[in-house]
């Protein structure tokens, strides 16, 4: 299963690399780091990642969209949102972390679906598209092919939840154990909701 | 305060980018991604990072050494271990995650100091240097300028502990809250010890 990690300038480091750590440990997953035009992309914490251009990868597998400061201006970038819409439609599963869900919402992919986001950015994310059923109390939300998580570290919990749904709870628990991670495995348990 | 994140082929993604997420959110920290010779370095999960060569950075601040499969052959690379020894001596603080402590131990930096590592690789790490006081039950250990953590996700807890020691517990708690992370703030609480 191909996993395309969609990066953009000022993405939040752990939003991407928490789930990458989890999915990258599964033999069944083949990770690709992609961006709109390829090349070096820098996270908000200054990590410079080499990426492939979107048009060069197979988009039929899993799409992972992190959040971060970069989402604040990307929602106004029509060309990016159109590309995102194209890939999201082709992808079997779409996973977002933090404000990554604002991008999918802007692309009208989440209309009529339940979704969540970072609780500190929730008002802004909600304002992007009112046709999404925004869930204000959830560590992560699954609806159809969409997995949307709360802020930053919640992406690790969601990725383990995704593994559990695809490959079984035993594999997810073993994986959490192997990275010495205390998995918040209940997606409804949200300590950070208002 | 300069933070040098020392990368090498097959480092473990979250070992580096968990602490990077934490330290990169502190205005006082300036992060640099470095490797022995600079250029692109790939993690075990296939993330390709652009790095600066070691000789071009100021090594007087914080050194962060991740673990991962790459440490298994690096402990036999005398030139790397010598370079590591040089930087570690110059650095005000040395932080390791997972089997990163095996590298510092091989460089004889931890002789007479308390230190820990991933509990799944503990026997191997211990075998690298018996003059280290290896602690088998600890989320992370602080001794002098050395902070050594358990496996992978424990690096996030340790980085928050480092922030707490330098900038106060309130700042560390605020930071954990901002990344919606459930901080295991007690360094003696180790759920993954045998």
Image (tube, coloured by chain):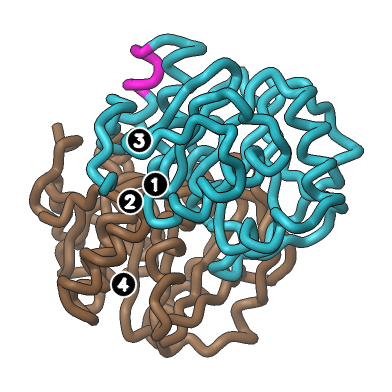
Chain colours: A cyan, B brown
From the viewer's perspective, is B80 left or right of B2?
right
From the viewer's perspective, is A32 left or right of B170?
right
Q: Nearer the viewer, mark 1 or mark 4?
A: 1
The x and y percentages for residue A91 are 73, 23
Question: Which contiguous range is marked in magenta?
Answer: A169-174
The x and y percentages for residue B32 are 56, 76
Q: CA distance from mark 1 to mark 4?
A: 32 Å
Q: Nearer the viewer, mark 1 or mark 2?
A: 2
Badge 2: how crowded within 10 Å, few (<14), some, or many (20+)?
Answer: many
Report which residue position mark 3 lands on: A139
From the viewer's perspective, is A194 left or right of A91?
left
Q: Disc 2 is attached to a residue of which chain?
A: B
Specify the farthest residue to the right: A55
Report which residue position mark 1 lands on: A153
Q: CA distance from mark 2 to mark 3?
A: 9 Å
Q: Nearer the viewer, mark 4 or mark 2?
A: 2
Q: Residue at x 15, y 37 (%)?
A: B191
Q: Nearer the viewer, residue A4 or B86?
A: A4
Q: Disc 3 is attached to a residue of which chain?
A: A
Q: Is residue A144 above or below residue B70?
A: above
Quadrant in which residue A106 is drawn: top right
Q: Disc 1 is attached to a residue of which chain?
A: A
Report which residue position mark 2 lands on: B180
Q: CA distance from mark 1 to mark 3?
A: 10 Å
Q: Is residue A171 magenta?
A: yes
Q: Are marks 2 and 3 in contact (CB under 8 Å)?
A: no
| Residue B13 can be seen in this image | no
Badge 3: how crowded within 10 Å, few (<14), some, or many (20+)?
Answer: many
- Sequence-first disc among 1 and 3: 3
């Amino acid at each position: 299963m191909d996993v395309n990690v969609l990066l953009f300038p000022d993405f939040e480091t752990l939003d991407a690399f928490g789930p990458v750590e989890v999915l990258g440990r599964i033999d069944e997953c083949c990770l690709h780091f992609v961006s709109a035009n390829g090349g070096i992309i820098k996270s908000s914490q200054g990590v410079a990642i080499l990426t492939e251009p979107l048009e060069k990868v197979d988009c039929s597998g899993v799409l992972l969209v992190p959040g971060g400061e970069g989402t604040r201006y990307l929602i106004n970038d029509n060309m990016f949102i159109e590309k995102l819409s194209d890939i999201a439609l082709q992808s079997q599963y779409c996973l977002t972390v933090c404000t990554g869900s604002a991008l999918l919402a802007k692309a009208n992919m989440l209309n009529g679906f339940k979704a969540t986001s970072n609780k500190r950015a929730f008002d802004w994310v909600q304002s992007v598209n009112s046709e999404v059923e925004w869930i204000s109390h959830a560590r992560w939300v699954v609806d159809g092919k969409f997995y949307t998580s709360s802020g930053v570290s919640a992406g690790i919990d969601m990725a383990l939840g995704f593994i559990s749904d695809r490959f079984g709870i035993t594999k997810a628990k073993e994986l959490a154990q192997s990275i010495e991670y205390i998995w918040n495995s209940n997606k409804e348990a949200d300590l950070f909701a208002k």
